[in-house]
Amino acid sequence: MSGHNKWSSIKHKKGAADAKRGAIFSRVSKEIIQAAREGGGDPNLNARLRAAIAAAKAANMPNDNIDRAIKKGTGELGGAAIEEFTYEGYAAGGVSVIINCMSDNKNRCASDIRSFFTRHNCKMAGSGAVSYKFKRKSRFVIEGEWADEDKLMELLMDADVDDIQVDDGTAEILAAPDAFAKILAIFEANGIVATESTLAMIPDSTTMVSDLGTAKSVQKFVDALEDYDDCQAVYHDMELSDDVAEALAEEE
């Protein structure tokens, strides 16, 4: 009997279009704005803002852009208010999907997301339809020397970590939401730069997909959403059989 290979929100990688600098800057700017709005403009007192600034610097965003985004969030600069919206539904094969967006136009964003579901033969659902299957967690991705389970377990032994997984030189750390600031501070104190540091929706269980066509349909839907300017993140519970995972890998 074949085993399985996760291709969930945990492992999903951005599509090729995310390599476009403009798309990255837009996404990170919105995160900085929202983080500053919620927790203030001082990154020393706002872990979410600190993580967003780190992501911006990793993307080579100019400091002027970062400062401008912070000031928009604190209200020092004008501009249309950006709000956060969450949408839920089902992709091919009954795969559960949660879409987080940030936009200055709620009606346009909702209409666009509805169109994505329609065009990809997916089903949009109401609030709470699939979110109960997910839990909000702190999520960090580490690459390089510190992508070592033993090292990370020792470093984070007092940080309320739920899980550490290491695969092919990349480590993923999941923890309680309120552990985010503490873990980020530990990494900073040890000179560790996380490739990703965010609060993410992680599925409690997964939906197995053993059909290559279904997997491609889900992947195409997710990639299309992630290419959308107002989309900040897409989470889903798809898990691939080994055969399907290998077939997709061969096509890359």
Image: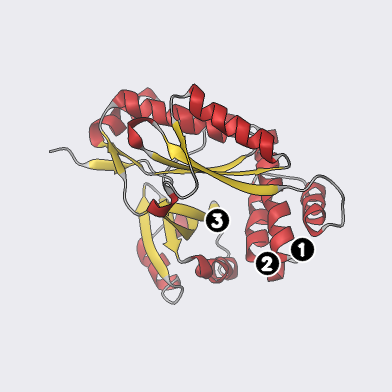
Q: Position of residue 215 (x, y in %)?
A: 35, 29
**Is residue 154 shown above or below 142?**
below
Left or right: where 76 falls relative to 101: right
Please tell me how crowded label 1 is: few (under 14), some (14-19), or many (20+) other residues with Cα within 10 Å.
many
The Cα atoms of the two marked residues, 2 and 1, are separated by 8 Å
Query: Is residue 21 visible to the viewer in this orientation of the structure?
Result: no
The Cα atoms of the two marked residues, 3 and 1, are separated by 18 Å
Mark closer to the chain start, 2 or 1: 1
> Which residue is denoted by mark 3 in the rendering?
198
> Which residue is denoted by mark 1 in the rendering?
41
Q: Which element is circle 3 on?
A: strand
The mark found on residue 164 in the picture is: none
Amino acid at circle 3: Thr
Q: Position of residue 201 (x, y in %)?
A: 47, 53
The residue under the point 61% across, 46% down is 85
Please tell me how crowded label 3 is: few (under 14), some (14-19), or many (20+) other residues with Cα within 10 Å.
some
Please tell me how crowded label 2 is: few (under 14), some (14-19), or many (20+) other residues with Cα within 10 Å.
some
The mark found on residue 46 in the picture is: 2
Q: Which element is circle 1 on?
A: loop
Q: Which element is circle 2 on?
A: loop
